[in-house]
């Protein structure tokens, strides 16, 4: 908490905290927003994993049917604001388990495509239990071009520490390979209880051998409100593991595409977080615009009630100061390991070097970034420190935000 507060004060040049207020209005200012990504949250899962912090609830058909109707309406309310069709970068479906609403996905996509032109593909997260030929065929014909499979580990002991079982995973991944999506990501977790360096490297090799074009290796984080039987491995071991992941991927010809993702060279990237601006639909979905950040309620019932009242389901709104918005942009650009000063100026409206000349000089001096033309690229050392700060941010900010939102449908105020 101390580290994140210090960084916030230093980078925003202000003691003002990020203030999320219980306010909402029908208008979202996105008509002229550049590089707009889209996200749809499906909160249903067939069973609940003890380690999972995301907004989800056990699948029930009647609730899913009411949710679908509300989701269609939310898309309509938002799209109605556009005077003409709008270009969007990507559309991602996350959850929860989006495949619990498999037969509705194509209708959701068509409703979105009625007003948005999606340029760089449509992605979906899949639980291994949902993979079969019929599901993959349905996704292909609905227009999905990117899939991300939540394998977490191929090691039975690690999986059992997570409270997971995995049957026939190799056959399932073979089906995904045969389906030939443009991007095939496998999610893995590192620093899990019982995990060794050997089993981690073996997980990475098995993921790429299964046909993955990308792996996302997330550190095991123990959220205060999850029900984990075990604690993550100590930070010293996490550091060694992340260094080994990075070295192993580099030595086997993979490219680092973010602090925690590695991909085959020349393939497109699956990333639902590194987007300059985005609109989110569904419970817990966030919306980021030029000067605002909004989060929808985490309660499925409250979400449906709000939509039925012809109102947007926003639970919290943050109005950014200029420097707060710049910090938000820099945080996620740095996660992708590249900060593009041209893009910074386009999104923030001020030159990067004018706002952060001292920080850029300092980061280069300490070997955290290197400048290449208009790009500032994280070094290996910089990527490790980013990983460290990202975990502190997750514990201090995301844990608090998600826990409060889980407990109260419309919190009065959250300050971070
Ligand atoms: S990890 Fe995936 S399947 Fe498990 S509860 Fe979370 S969203 Fe659902």
Image (cartoon, grey):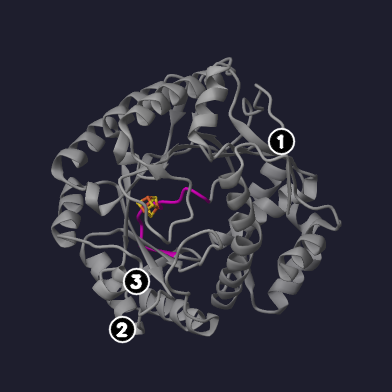
Query: What quarter of the picture does the C terminus occupy?
Result: bottom right
Circles 2 and 1: CB distance less than 8 Å?
Answer: no
The image shows residue 221 at horizontal and vertical percentages of 50, 67
Asked if 258 appears above or below 3 in the picture, the reply is: above
Q: In this view, does 65 lie to the left or right of 370?
A: left
Asked if 274 appears above or below 98 in the picture, the reply is: below
* Cβ of mark 1 under 8 A from ligand 1: no
Which stretch did the figure color magenta? 261-273
| Residue at x-position 65% and y-position 21% | 26
| Residue at x-position 31% and y-position 31% | 61
The image shows residue 348 at horizontal and vertical percentages of 72, 44
Name the residue tied to disc 2.
198
Numbered label attached to residue 334: none
Mark pair 2, 1: CA separation = 48 Å
The image shows residue 84 at horizontal and vertical percentages of 55, 16
Mark pair 3, 1: CA separation = 38 Å
Name the residue tied to disc 3.
161
Name the residue tied to disc 1.
22
Q: Which of marks 3 and 1 is nearer the N terminus?
A: 1
């Amino acid at each position: 908490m101390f580290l994140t507060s210090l960084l916030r004060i230093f980078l925003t040049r202000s003691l003002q905290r990020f203030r999320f207020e219980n306010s909402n209005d029908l208008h979202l200012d996105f008509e002229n927003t550049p590089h707009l990504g889209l996200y749809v949250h499906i909160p249903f899962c067939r069973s609940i994993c003890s380690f999972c912090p995301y907004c989800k609830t056990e699948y029930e058909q009647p609730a899913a049917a009411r949710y679908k109707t509300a989701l269609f309406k939310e898309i309509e309310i938002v799209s109605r604001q556009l005077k003409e069709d709008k270009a969007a970068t990507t559309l991602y479906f996350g959850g929860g388990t989006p495949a619990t609403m498999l037969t509705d996905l194509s209708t959701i996509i068509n409703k979105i495509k009625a007003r948005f032109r999606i340029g760089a593909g449509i992605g979906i997260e899949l639980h291994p239990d949902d993979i079969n030929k019929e599901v993959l065929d349905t996704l292909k014909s609905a227009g999905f071009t990117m899939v991300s499979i939540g394998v977490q580990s191929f090691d039975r002991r690690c999986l059992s520490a997570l409270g997971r079982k995995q049957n026939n995973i190799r056959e399932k991944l073979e089906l995904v390979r045969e389906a030939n999506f443009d991007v095939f990501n496998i999610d893995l977790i590192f620093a899990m209880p019982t995990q060794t360096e050997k089993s981690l490297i073996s997980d990475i090799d098995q993921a790429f051998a299964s046909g993955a074009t990308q792996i996302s290796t997330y550190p095991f984080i123990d959220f205060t409100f999850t029900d984990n039987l075990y604690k993550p491995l100590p930070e010293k071991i996490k550091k060694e593991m992340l260094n080994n992941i990075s070295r192993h991927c580099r030595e086997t010809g993979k490219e680092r595409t973010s602090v925690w993702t590695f991909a085959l060279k020349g393939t497109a990237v699956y990333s639902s977080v590194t987007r300059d601006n985005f609109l989110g639909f569904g419970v817990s979905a966030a919306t980021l615009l030029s000067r605002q950040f909004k989060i929808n309620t985490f309660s499925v019932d409250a979400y449906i009630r709000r939509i039925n009242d012809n109102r947007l389901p926003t639970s919290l709104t943050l109005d950014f100061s200029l420097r707060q918005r710049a910090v938000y942009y820099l945080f996620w650009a740095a996660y992708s390991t590249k900060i593009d000063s041209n893009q910074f100026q386009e999104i923030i409206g001020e030159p990067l070097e004018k706002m952060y000349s001292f920080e850029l000089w300092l980061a280069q001096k300490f070997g955290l970034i290197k400048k290449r033309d208009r790009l500032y690229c994280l070094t290996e050392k910089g990527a490790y420190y980013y990983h460290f700060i990202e975990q502190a941010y997750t514990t201090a900010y995301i844990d608090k935000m998600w826990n409060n939102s889980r407990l109260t449908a419309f919190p009065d105020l959250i300050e971070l």
